[in-house]
Image (tube, rainbow, N blue to C red):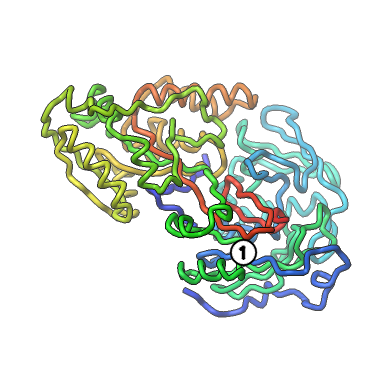
Amino acid sequence: MTKKNIIIGLLIVIALVGFIKKDYLIDKSSDLLFGGRDYKEEVLTIVLSESATDISPYSLNLNNLIRSANIYQGLVAFDRNLKIIPSLAVSWGNLDSKTWEFKLRQGVLFHDRSAFTASNVIESYEAAIEEADSLVSTYLDNIEEIKVIDDFNIQIITKTPDPLLLSKLTKFFITRPGNIGTGPYQIREWVKGMMFDLAAFTDYWGKQPAYRNVQYVVTSSKSLREKNFEDGKTDILTAVTQEQALELPKGQIKTSYGLEVNFLMFDLQDELLSQREIREAIQTIFDPAQIEAIGNHFVRQATQFVAPGVYGYNPDIEPFEFNEENRAKDLFGELLEKITFDHLSSYRTLSEYIIEQLREAGFSVKDNAVSPEELLKKIKTNESQFYLIGWQAEDGDAGGFLDAFIHSEGEFNNGRYVNSEVDGLIEESRQEMNPQIRLELLQKIMEKVHDDLIGIPLFESSRLYAVQDGVDWEPRLDGLVLAAEVE
């Protein structure tokens, strides 16, 4: 199973080296800038907090993808809500559980104006698995073979049945040598650490974007980012902080509850926390209204370990009930049992609230603030008794969380949760090709995990953006900010 990105606690992975990447320049006199299309003449300016480290088709870091996904395309893509839609393939289907057939789109041109055919799929596949620094190869490791039927029909044969193949293929971009793509925009200029200029590709196969020219600008200073937006120099401001969102006009703030859930996890083999009545008591002491207030009301209560936009989310699961009278203390009195609480040092306010509630419930709490690296190490080595973490289902599927945290052999199953029935259901879901049956399997697993009380889902975190009046754009669940989606 492809390894998913871990998002620790509230940490969202979203210097300045000034040199021009000559490989990524285009002819500024070309019709990419002056083509006869009815574009908006003003430059669309999108401000980011961090620069791209790589814009090759093999880098899957979100900060890089925000830029590169304007240029490159795959056989299929995610829409704004993470539904699979056609891209360079117009249709597909299964001949059997391991054989997929794809009909390719005709009339597509690369940015060098060469025609897209099935041979480009083969070339891109070979490059993706052979590239030394390719992260894409991990998404393609279940592919046994890609067969060319003719110029516009291919078959993909997998080693084992793979219900997530389409999702994985969204990470696999089809390019020509030299990182030449087929997307609605082509790179005009990239000054690493500063700006990334795009120009509309006038021979794009799909709907032409609204803006002829686009700039992704890096501004790390929070105050300068806010000032430039207020002065009208920025159309879309990403990575808006909660404090900034409270200061800017409410109508210009876009809130996206995406794919991340933050939660507390128990070590189920711990002498204290292995007792269900202890865990039941602890899950009653956290007030969701208080947690939302700590998050300036830009977070919302979670009912389970994956967010509503994730495939496998179970809408029938109810959130844990908060007991205002502190049921834990009523049940156990002054336990003075020690709980070591591991959390990121950067999230002091939330951690202080959790510690305060535990102490009021009668527990003796050791406050252990650590770095992300230290927390990951403790989780992987089963050394954390009770910790705060977050998970982002980056592919929009619950399977990654279940493999990593819930399966008895999961890489991050620090809680040492073992349930043979749940293991069997997870393994079954990995190869179930019927989408409805698989959805029911995932939802059943989520319900069992909830009932077994392995942890406490706290809240869904959000991404915040500021958007100028007159700019029509809605956030995506996956955090990409694609220029072609701006009107």
Q: Residue at x 77, y 58 (%)?
A: 209
State the image quarter where residue 465 is shown: bottom right
State the image quarter where residue 356 is shown: top left
Is 252 drawn above or below residue 459 in the view shown? below
Depth order, front residue of 90/349? 349
- Total marks placed: 1
Is 461 drawn above or below residue 99 in the view shown? below
Where residue 354 appears, as percent x and y from the top left, is 27, 41
Query: Is 234 positioned to the left or the right of 341 in the image?
Result: right
Where residue 102 appears, as percent x and y from the top left, is 77, 39
State the image quarter where residue 190 is shown: bottom right
Depth order, front residue of 448/291? 291
Where residue 72 appears, as percent x and y from the top left, is 70, 57
Query: Is 397 positioned to the left or the right of 335 in the image?
Result: right
Where residue 305 appears, as percent x and y from the top left, is 44, 34
Dot 1 amino acid type? Ile
Depth order, front residue of 253/374? 253
Q: Residue at x 21, y 27 (%)?
A: 328
The residue that label 1 is drawn on is 46
Q: Residue at x 64, y 27 (%)?
A: 435
